[in-house]
C-alpha cells in the first residue's frame, strides 16, 4: 500500500495529464505539462490559485472549460477528500469535468483497477483482433470491447501497465496505417491472419471456446452498409474586431510635438517615440463569461457575421459602441488595421481588425467588472487566448510597418 502523500501526488499527476490529453495530442501537451508541474507540483498549491492564473498557463491548449473544471475539481478533492482522488468510479464522476474515461483512467493508474481504458486506439485494436469492426454498430462495438477488456483483465497483472501498453500499441503500431509485421500480438489477430496467405487456410478452422461471443462465427454475413460517424461541418465566419482605444489628448499632443515636427534626419527618434506610444496606449477588453470557445477569457470586442461588406462596418461598429455606452471620438471613422485567418477544429474566423478612439471611456467600465482597460504592453498579464494573441500580433505588425514609413503620422 502506498502512503497518502504518494497517492495524492500520483493521483494529481495522472489527473492533470488525462485532462490535458483530452482532444489534444501528446507532443502538444508535453511542454504544457512540464510548465504546469514546475508551477504547481501538487494539488494543494493549485487549489489555492484563482482561475485567471490557471487560464494564463493553459493558453494554447484550447477547450478552456477544461481548465475551469480542473480547478474546481482540485478544490473539491482537497476540501472533501484531503487531496486524494477516491477509488470509486461513481464518486469520481460527480466531480466537475470527469466522465467515464477519466474516472477509469484514475482508478486504473492510481489503484491498479482491473480494467482497460477504452478509447479509439483500444477499439481499433480489439475490433481487429476479433475481426468485428464491420459487424457491429458503434454502441455494440463499445460493449464488445469492454467484454474483451474484462477477459484480458481476468488474471493477475499490473493493469496500469497493461492499459498503457495497449494505448501505446494503438498509437504507434496498430494505428490507421498499421505495421502488422511489427505487432507483438499479431499471432492472435484475426485480421492479420486473414490477410496472411500462409495461415489463411487455418483461420476459420479454429475451435471457439464454449459460450464465446467475442468473434463473429458466421463469416458469410453480407455487409451492405457500415455507418460512419457524422463529421461536423466546417464553418466559415467573418469576425470584425474593434480595438477601442482611450483618446488621451495630452499624450497625443506630446507625440505630435516630439515626432511630427522633427526633421527627416531625426526620423528614427520619432519612430521609436511613436512605437513606445502605441504600446503604452490603453485598450478595452471584455471578459467572456459564456460557456463557448472563449470562456473565461478577456477579448477585444468583436462581431460575427456570415458575409463581409465594408459599407456595413460603420453601422455594426456604431451599434457596438452604443451597446457599450461610449461614443467614437471621430464620428463614423474606423481605421482599418489588418486581416488574418484563425482556424479552430471545425470553424474558421476570417478576421478583420479595426481601430477607433473614445473620449468618454470612463463610461465603459462603470458598474461592470467584466470590462477592463488594459495597456497593450501589459496584456500578457491578463487571461487571453491564442485568437486574442493573434489579433495583438497582427496589430503590432501593422503598426510597426506604418511606423517604419511614418506615412500615417508625419503629414
Image (tube, rainbow, N blue to C red):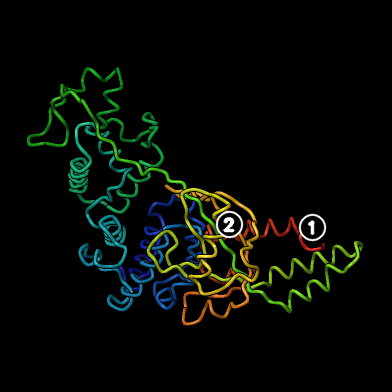
Residue visible at 47% across and 57% down in the picture? 61
Q: Position of residue 388 (x, y in %)?
A: 54, 61
Q: In this rendering, does residue 160 appear at all?
A: yes
Neighbour class for label 2 at 10 Å: few (<14), some, many (≥20)?
some
The answer to whether residue 352 is above or below residue 170 is below
Image quarter of the N terminus? bottom left
* Near-viewer residue (321 or 70): 321
Mark 2 → mark 1, Cα distance in angstroms: 24 Å
Residue visible at 46% across and 46% down in the picture? 236
Q: Position of residue 270 (x, y in %)?
A: 83, 66
Side (left or right) of 31 relative to 12:
right
Total labels: the figure holds: 2
The answer to whether residue 308 is above or below residue 330 is above
Residue visible at 41% across and 40% down in the picture? 172
Side (left or right) of 180 relative to 355:
left
Q: Quadrant of residue 253?
A: bottom right
Neighbour class for label 1 at 10 Å: few (<14), some, many (≥20)?
few
Residue 75 is labelled as none
Q: Secondary structure at mark 1?
A: loop
The answer to whether residue 99 is above or below residue 132 is below
Q: Position of residue 316 (x, y in %)?
A: 52, 60
Q: Position of residue 281 (x, y in %)?
A: 67, 72
Of all residues, the one furthest to the bottom in this rendering is 367
Image quarter of the C terminus? bottom right
* Near-viewer residue (260 or 72): 260
Side (left or right) of 190 relative to 386:
left
> Would you name the residue on which mark 2 appears?
390
> Would you name the residue on which mark 1 appears?
407
Q: Secondary structure at mark 2?
A: helix
Q: In this rendering, does residue 112 appear at all?
A: no
The answer to whether residue 143 is above or below residue 329 is above
Amino acid at each position: 500500500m502506498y502512503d497518502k502523500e504518494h497517492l495524492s501526488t500520483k493521483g494529481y499527476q495522472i489527473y492533470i495529464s488525462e485532462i490535458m490529453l483530452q482532444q489534444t495530442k501528446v507532443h502538444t501537451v508535453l511542454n504544457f505539462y512540464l510548465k504546469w508541474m514546475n508551477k504547481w507540483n501538487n494539488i494543494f498549491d493549485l487549489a489555492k490559485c484563482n482561475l485567471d492564473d490557471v487560464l494564463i498557463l493553459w493558453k494554447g491548449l484550447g477547450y478552456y472549460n477544461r481548465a475551469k473544471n480542473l480547478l474546481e475539481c482540485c478544490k473539491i478533492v482537497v476540501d472533501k477528500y484531503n487531496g486524494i482522488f477516491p477509488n470509486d468510479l461513481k464518486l469520481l464522476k460527480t466531480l466537475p469535468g470527469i466522465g467515464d474515461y477519466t474516472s477509469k483512467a484514475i482508478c486504473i493508474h492510481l489503484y491498479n483497477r482491473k480494467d482497460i481504458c477504452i478509447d479509439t486506439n483500444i477499439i481499433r485494436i480489439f475490433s481487429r483482433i476479433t475481426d468485428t469492426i464491420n459487424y457491429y454498430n458503434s454502441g455494440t462495438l463499445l460493449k464488445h470491447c469492454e467484454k474483451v477488456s474484462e477477459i484480458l483483465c481476468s488474471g493477475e497483472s499490473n493493469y496500469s501497465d497493461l492499459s498503457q501498453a495497449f494505448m501505446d500499441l494503438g498509437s504507434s503500431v496498430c494505428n490507421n496505417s498499421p505495421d502488422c509485421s511489427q505487432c507483438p500480438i499479431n499471432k492472435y489477430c484475426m485480421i492479420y491472419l486473414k490477410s496472411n496467405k500462409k495461415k489463411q487456410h487455418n483461420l476459420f478452422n479454429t475451435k471457439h471456446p464454449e459460450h464465446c461471443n467475442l468473434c463473429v462465427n458466421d463469416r458469410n454475413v453480407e455487409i451492405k452498409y457500415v455507418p460512419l460517424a457524422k463529421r461536423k461541418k466546417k464553418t466559415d465566419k467573418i469576425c470584425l474586431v474593434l480595438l477601442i482605444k482611450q483618446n488621451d489628448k495630452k499624450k497625443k499632443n506630446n507625440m505630435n510635438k516630439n515626432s511630427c515636427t522633427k526633421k527627416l534626419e531625426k526620423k528614427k527618434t520619432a519612430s521609436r517615440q511613436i512605437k513606445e506610444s502605441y504600446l503604452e496606449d490603453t485598450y478595452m477588453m471584455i471578459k467572456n463569461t459564456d460557456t463557448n470557445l472563449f470562456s473565461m477569457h478577456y477579448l477585444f470586442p468583436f462581431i460575427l457575421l456570415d458575409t463581409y461588406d465594408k459599407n456595413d462596418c460603420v453601422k455594426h461598429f456604431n451599434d457596438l459602441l452604443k451597446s457599450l455606452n461610449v461614443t467614437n471620438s471621430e464620428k463614423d471613422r474606423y481605421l482599418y488595421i489588418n486581416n488574418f485567418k484563425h482556424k479552430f477544429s471545425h470553424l474558421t474566423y476570417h478576421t478583420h481588425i479595426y481601430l477607433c478612439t473614445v473620449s468618454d471611456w470612463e463610461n465603459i467600465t462603470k458598474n461592470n467588472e467584466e470590462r477592463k482597460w488594459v495597456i497593450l504592453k501589459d496584456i500578457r498579464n491578463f487571461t487571453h487566448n491564442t485568437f486574442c494573441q493573434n489579433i495583438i500580433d497582427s496589430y503590432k505588425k501593422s503598426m510597426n510597418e506604418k511606423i517604419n514609413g511614418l506615412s500615417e503620422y508625419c503629414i
